[in-house]
Amino acid sequence: MAITNFQVGTAVTAAFTASADTAVTVIYITNKTDGDGTIDVYVTPNGATVGPNYLVYSQLTVKARDTYIIDTEKMILETGAKIYIAAPDSAAQFNATISTIGL
């Protein structure tokens, strides 16, 4: 297992890139502020450009000082696939922790 920590910003930025075939077991997204905030999460296959077709969570609200956990379905990523997380319209600050295991 491996853990990746990512500081979420306003720009759509890759939070994780699979260096080999990988299963994502859980993603924790923590709102570190006293106000609610929203995030967007995208997952792209190798070689794809991030865009609306790869949006898996749109304007997801994370309450103040709370953590949203994505763990219901496991994602299998091919080598080069990416997870992007951004808070484009939010004043809140977020941290994402992504747990993965190689296949």
Image (spheres, rainbow, N blue to C red):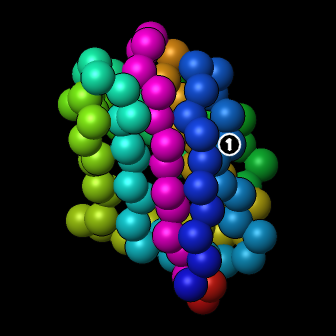
Give the residue at mark 1.
14
Residue found at the far bottom of this picture: 103
Q: Is residue 3 left or right of residue 38?
A: right
User: Is 102 located above or below residue 82 in the figure?
Assistant: below
User: Is 74 located above or below residue 37 in the figure?
Assistant: below
Residue 99 lies in the magenta-colored region: yes
Q: Is residue 44 visible?
A: no
Residue 86, given in percent of the width and then of the height, sits at 53, 29
Q: Residue at x 42, y 73 (%)?
A: 25
- Quarter holding the N terminus is bottom right
User: In which quarter of the view is residue 36 placed?
Assistant: top left
Residue nearest the observer in this picture, 74 or 53? 74
Mark 1 falls on what kind of element? strand
Q: Residue at x 59, y 55 (%)?
A: 5
- Magenta stretch: give its range: 89-101
Q: Is residue 47 visible?
A: yes
User: In which quarter of the view is residue 13 placed?
Assistant: top right
Residue 83, given in percent of the width and then of the height, sits at 58, 49
User: Is 52 located above or below residue 90 in the figure?
Assistant: below
Residue found at the far front of this picture: 34
- Quarter holding the C terminus is bottom right
Residue 68 lies in the magenta-colored region: no
Label 1 sits on what residue type? Ala
